[in-house]
Image (cartoon, grey):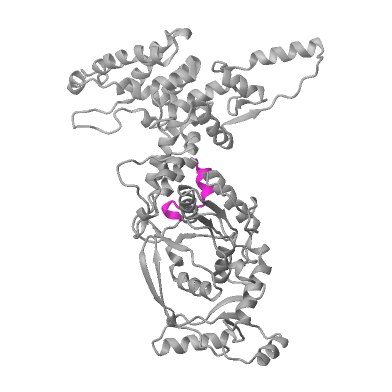
Amino acid sequence: MDSEEFKFRKPGEVRTRFAPAPTGFLHIGAARTALFNYLFAKKHKGVFVLRIEDTDIERSKPKYEKDILESLKWLGIEWDEGPDIDGNYGPYRQSKRLKIYSQYLEKLLAENKAYYCFCSEEELEAQRQYRLSIGEAPRYSRKCADLSKEEVERLRATRKPSVIRFRLPAKKIEFNDLIREKLEFDTSLIGDIVIAKNLTNPLYNFACVVDDFENKVSHVIRGEEHISNTPKQILLQEALNFPSPQYAHLPMILAPDRTKLSKRHGATGILEYRKEGYLPEAVINFIAFLGWNPGGEREIYSMPSLTKEFSIERVQKGGAIFNIKRLDFLNSFYIRQRSAEKLTELCLPYLLEAGLIEELKPAAEPSFMPSQALRKRKKEQKKDKVFGEQTQSTQLFEEKGAKFRIKATGEVINLAWLQKIVLIYQERLKKISEISESTEFFFKEKLEYEKNLLRWPRAKASAQEQVMADKEIKVSLDKSEKILSKIKPEDWNKENLEKILIPEAEKFSKELGRVGEPAAKIRETKIDRGYLLWPLRVALSGKEASAGPFEVVEILGKEKTIKRIKEAKELL
């Protein structure tokens, strides 16, 4: 290796890296590390490198690597160089770089900066216990540090198990952390560290140092759990005559109670968030504020605006608090920004998975059909009841060969009808996955719910206020049925329904009194539309909380609306 190989980078060039080990699914903390490296590189018109650290053969799995790559792509964190995008400093997978590690290990051994250690696990444990017993921090005793070359060769020839240790100089190490400023360590407390199991099996600290140099990394941005590794890596860089990159250590992500973050706090793998119905923009926006704040009141940031505003100096030192409610808030915001077509497209998989609807793919028809078969097909098509009007987007969708059927009723539906359902819940959804449970009543033949749910008010506002009795509920439902039965099909729309029902609801709240008794005084002085509209909405949805009665009535249609009112009265 000549001095030419030790040239580092052009002055001012920024190259960051995200180097995950494929030993588990990509979690929120690792995703934040990737995002901050990406934003820092893009902010400074630099290069973002993805490097796969897969030297742990036993724990590294292809499924985890696939998850990492898919998660980053879903979030919109695109790398410039990586395992699937060649660059000038690859390969970008550690398992493909074993020869490179061997060369540097041999260099350290040849210069007596590293040595073979043949101590057994039992010996090392005994040394550890001794150090602890005299009140010192455990560190290696250097028993094998001065073995002669002949003794080393003899022990290796007998295949005695060994590792390669780095002669860690005992000195004070100082470095400037871009987040935490000046940090200082006394390496005499560390001792000689193991850097490889053998010439082709390097360990983290050594492989990381070599890779950062070979990949021309200028800035290492990582979690604070790596702070203790930094002095070891700096000393390895000095031993190998490598320049040191600049370091920045991100704060830990903590639960709301400032304990260790876990799944019970809502933290999970990135693709699990996708499965739960979170949008990538919301997750990115959420992750960005875990330890970073641009200042000011603004809360919503796109990736381009994050890139513009990001500054490593504004990353906090203290722990970042993970609050799933904030993620829900951000997700609901981005859901509201989606177009009707796009949101329906996002909701479809959840409706299908819940078994509420099924996709129908029409078989290719022959160019010629016997007249009898053709007549039979037309007759069957007439029997199919189709909800919703045909729109251009629906036509485009159906041209691709997709239609849907309600599983419970067998009714064929089009995309426009589904779109109406999705739209009335757009303001209510926190996650896309909520669409199935929220709207299931649209897809059922008959609803099941307790009759007490029909009662209004749900809770007394005062001692005077009276909860509806069964007979009053029946009077209310009779009234709704009578009103709705008179509305013509061409007038069956939300605006007209609202125009008719609201005055009737106000009038009804004054008229309604307990059977055999005059109306309660509270009802004489207070207009409460709930006495008419609550039983109607529950009769149609079977839910305590749902979209408004006017929207539901419009989408269900006159026939189903009247049918469900009658079924509600049967409960009484």
Q: Position of residue 40 (x, y in %)?
A: 45, 51
Which is more toward the observer, 77 or 80?
Answer: 80
Q: Eyeballing the image, is 566 above or below 116?
A: above
One can see residue 565 in this view: no
Q: Position of residue 361 (x, y in %)?
A: 69, 27
Q: Is residue 464 left or right of residue 33?
A: left
Dominant SS type (magenta): helix
Q: Magenta span covers which residues? A: 263-278
Quadrant in which the N terminus is drawn:
bottom right
Quadrant in which the C terminus is drawn:
top left
Corner quadrant of residue 206: bottom right
Q: Is residue 464 left or right of residue 282?
A: left
Q: Is residue 63 left or right of residue 532?
A: right
**Number of dots carrying numbers:** 0
Question: What residue lies at 54% left-to-right and 17% top-to-bottom?
Answer: 388
Q: Eyeballing the image, is 285 above or below 131?
A: above
